[in-house]
Image (spheres, rainbow, N blue to C red):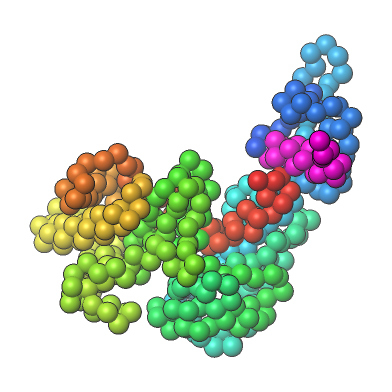
Amino acid sequence: MTSTPSFAVKEHNRNAIARYLYAHAHATKQELERELGLSLPTITQNLRMLDGEGLITRGALQESTGGRKARSYEFNARHRVSIGVSMRPGDLVLCAVDLHGNVIAEADRAIPYRNTNAYYQRIGGIVNDFAAETEKDSTAALGVVFSVQGIVSADGTAITFGAIMGNTGLTLDVISQSVHYPCIMIRDCAASAMAELWADPTLTDAVCIYLDRRPGGAVIVGGGLHQGPNQCNGAIEHMCLVPNGKACYCGNRGCMDAYCSPETLPEDYESIPGFFSVLEQGETHHRERMDEWLEHVAQAIVNARTMIAGDVIIGGEAAQYLDDGDIADLRARVERLSPFGTDRFVLRKSLRSDHQDAVGAALRPVEAYLEDICGK
C-alpha cells in the first residue's frame, strides 16, 4: 500500500482547519479536535501557522467550565479583498468584497463611457485609488475584475461582441492599461449569476434572467456557472420572440431584448420609475402595456426552460418594481404557455440587487483563493 506523502497530509490538515473556521463564527482547539478528529499538537501547529499568515485571528476567551478558559479562533475575512468594476454607458461602479463576500466598500462615479485610451487611463486611476483605500487596514487586494456588457472571448482577453458599448474587439490589456493589480473580465450577466450562487449555495440548475434596459441571462448547471466554450451561454436577449419583429441592436429583428427591456414600457417622455408609479394607481393603458410585457417575459422564460428545465431567477432593474403578485402572475403565464404543463420549479426574484454584477465579478478571485487555502 502506498503511503500518503507527509506534505499532502499537512496540506489536508491545514485546509480542513481553515475550512472549518471559515464556515463557523469561531472555534476552540477542543472543538476542532472533536469535529475534525485531529490531535491537539497538530491543531496547535496549524493554528500558529495560519495565525502567522494572517488567515485567522484570536477571538475571545470562552466561559470557563471549571478549568482554564479556552481561547477561540476566527477566520480573518479581511485577510484579502477583491475588487469588482462595472463599466456602464453612464457610470462606473466599484465594489470591494472580503473573503466572506461581504461588501466592505463601494463607489459610483458618473463617468460616461468612451472607448478611448483617455477613458481607460482615467478609470485606471480611480480603480487604483479605490483598491489602495481598501488596503489601508493591512489587507491586500487579490485583483480587479471588470464586468462588461458584452461577450468575452474564451481566454478572457477580449470582447468578441460589444454592440451595446460599441467596443467589439476591445482587449483586456487596453482596459487595464493603467491598473496596478492583476485583472480579468467577465460578462455582466455571468457576474450577476455568480452573486446568485454565493447568496444561495443550494442552487443547482437555474436560468437567471436580468431585466435591465439591456436584458440578458446566465445559466447555472450542477451548482455552478455554465458559460460554454464561447462564454455566451444564457445570452437569451437575442433569442427570437417575434419573427420579423422589432429591430434589435444586434442587427436582427424580433429579439427578446426588443420586447422585454423595461424601456419598452414607458410612453413618450415617461421614465421607467414614472411608468410603474402610474401603474400602481391603476391606470388602464399602463396595465395593458404591463400585461403585454409580462407575456413576452413569460414566453422568454418558457423558451429558456425548454433547454434548461430548472428554476428561474428574475433580476435586473425591472425586478425591483415586481411585487409578489406580479411574480405569481408571471409564473401563471409561464405555466399556461409551457408545452409540458405544470412542473415543479421555483420562480423568484434575485436575492441581490444593488451593484450585483460588480459584486459577482469581485467574487470570482475570492472563490479561487478560498479553494487554494481551504481546498475544494
Q: Is 347 placed above or below 144 here?
A: above
Q: Residue at x 44, y 79 (%)?
A: 162
Task: Residue 268: name its quadrant.
Answer: bottom left
The quarter of the picture where the N terminus appears is top right
Front-lying residue, 143 or 6 = 6
Left/right placement of residue 305 relative to residue 170 reads left
Task: Residue 158: name its quadrant.
Answer: bottom right
- Asked if residue 295 lies in the magenta stretch, the reply is no
Left/right placement of residue 340 relative to residue 5 reads left
Q: Residue at x 70, y 40 (%)?
A: 19
* Position of residue 364 measured from the top left corner of the image (x, y, whole percent): 59, 58
Magenta range: 1-22
Left/right placement of residue 193 relative to residue 71 reads left
* Position of residue 117 measured from the top left corner of the image (x, y, whole percent): 59, 88
* Position of residue 72 measured from the top left corner of the image (x, y, whole percent): 78, 30
Q: Is residue 78 visible?
A: no
| Outermost left residue | 284
Q: How many marks?
A: 0
